[in-house]
Image (cartoon, rainbow, N blue to C red):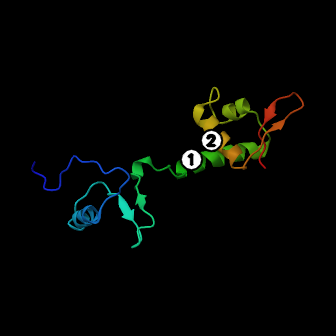
Amino acid sequence: MDFTHYTTETRKGQHLNFEERMTIELRLKDGWNINQMLRFEMNPERDYLTVKIPVHPYFLPKSSSSKNAAYEKKILSLLSEKPRSMTELAIAMGYKGITAKLTRTVNAMLDGGVICKIIDVDNAVKLPVK
């Protein structure tokens, strides 16, 4: 084999030895980029081993953008005029019907406690601002 430290033996129940940890550290210092390589931490007594696995920024949750904030603000302004049902809200926003984006945004606002649901006299669910 071309690799001096290549081995096919398995070490059941064992973690990286000192040499393997140092190889990883040296390669990191030499500028190897293995997509934000794993980080291993342990104390000198080897009581514990912590492995930190970084997450690529693409997979992190998206923060609320200014576009979404403007959308929520428009919903709040329409609901502050009077409580509306989802259909009434969709029509007031210029849609022909209830869209997926409107449903997601209203549900997020309900979960966040920004708006609440009430039952009208006609048993219609209305969305007033809290």
Q: Which mark is residue 105?
A: 2
User: Which one is nearer the viewer's eye here, 6 or 129?
Assistant: 6
Asked which secondary structure carries label 2, the reply is helix
Which of the 4 image quadrants contains residue 110?
Answer: top right
User: Which one is nearer the viewer's eye here, 100 or 14?
Assistant: 14
User: Which one is nearer the viewer's eye here, 91 or 63?
Assistant: 63
User: Which one is nearer the viewer's eye here, 73 or 120?
Assistant: 120
Residue 65 lies, in percent from the top left, at: 52, 51
- Residue type at mark 1: give it: Asn
Residue 104 lies, in percent from the top left, at: 61, 38
CA gap, disc 2 and disc 1: 8 Å
Residue 32 lies, in percent from the top left, at: 22, 60
Q: Are marks 2 and 1 in contact (CB under 8 Å)?
A: yes
Q: Would you call the spot at circle 2 few (<14 residues within 10 Å), some (14-19), or many (20 or more)?
A: some
Identify the residue shown where x is 77% and y is 36%. 84
Placement of 38 over or under 127, stated as above or below: below
Asked which secondary structure carries label 1, the reply is helix
Residue 53 horizontal side relative to residue 24, left or right: right
Q: Which residue position is annotated with label 1?
A: 68
- Residue at the far left: name it: 2
Identify the residue shown where x is 77% and y is 39%. 127
- Residue type at mark 2: give it: Thr
Placement of 29 over or under 75, stated as above or below: below
Label 2 or label 1, whichever comes before in sequence order: 1
